[in-house]
Image: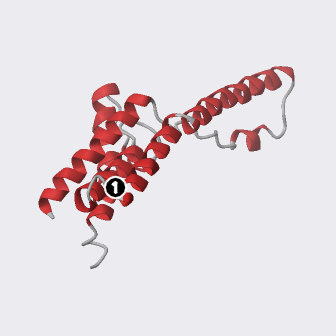
Amino acid sequence: MHLISNYPLTAALTAIIFAQVVKIPIRLIATREFMPGLAFSTGGMPSSHSAAVTALSTAIGLTEGFSSTLFAVAAVFSIITMFDASGVRRHAGEQATVLNRLVKDFQVLIDGAKNWEKKGNYEKREDLKELLGHQPIEVFFGALTGIIVAIVLFQLY
């Protein structure tokens, strides 16, 4: 019961869940694709990482004060997390896209040269995860989501 009464924790977890679930209708509206698996994947609009850390920071600011040391720590943590989500992780995803394309092109080259006996095993190989990080707009809307969730829940607490 003590965890449920922890408003900053509840705000952060609620923001993650909301951001993950809302990816499904956003994708449906944008591309006409129904992909329920998005609720359990990384990347996409909005960023659940950004939603979580901004909800946590906002909740701490609302409860402890925006001039508190704890809020400062949470805010810096949020900035680093959002920078990583839109920088390092996004670039890793772009590299995964290029590597997957290279592997597929190499497969075509090998298939054209000869029959490859182990082709069946090779085709079972899993592609690298390409949707790892976020575009800056996804981070922005994730952050906005987290702030809104924290403020709404603050009114309920």
Mark 1 Cα-neighbour bin, 10 Å: few <14, some 14–19, many ≥20: many
**50 lies left or right of 150:** right
Which amino acid, by three-letter code, is at mark 1?
Leu
**131 lies left or right of 53:** right
87 relative to 111, above or below? below
Measured from the top left, where is residue 156 in percent x and y? Answer: 13, 61
60 relative to 129, above or below? below
> Quadrant of the rendered structure where residue 115 is?
top right
What residue sits right under mark 1 in the picture? 56
Viewport quadrant of the N terminus: bottom left
14 relative to 145, above or below? below
Identify the residue at the far left of this view: 155
Using the rendered image of the protein, determine whether residue 17 is visible from the camera's viewpoint: no
**156 lies left or right of 50:** left
Q: Nearer the viewer, residue 133 or 63?
A: 63
Element carrying mark 1: helix
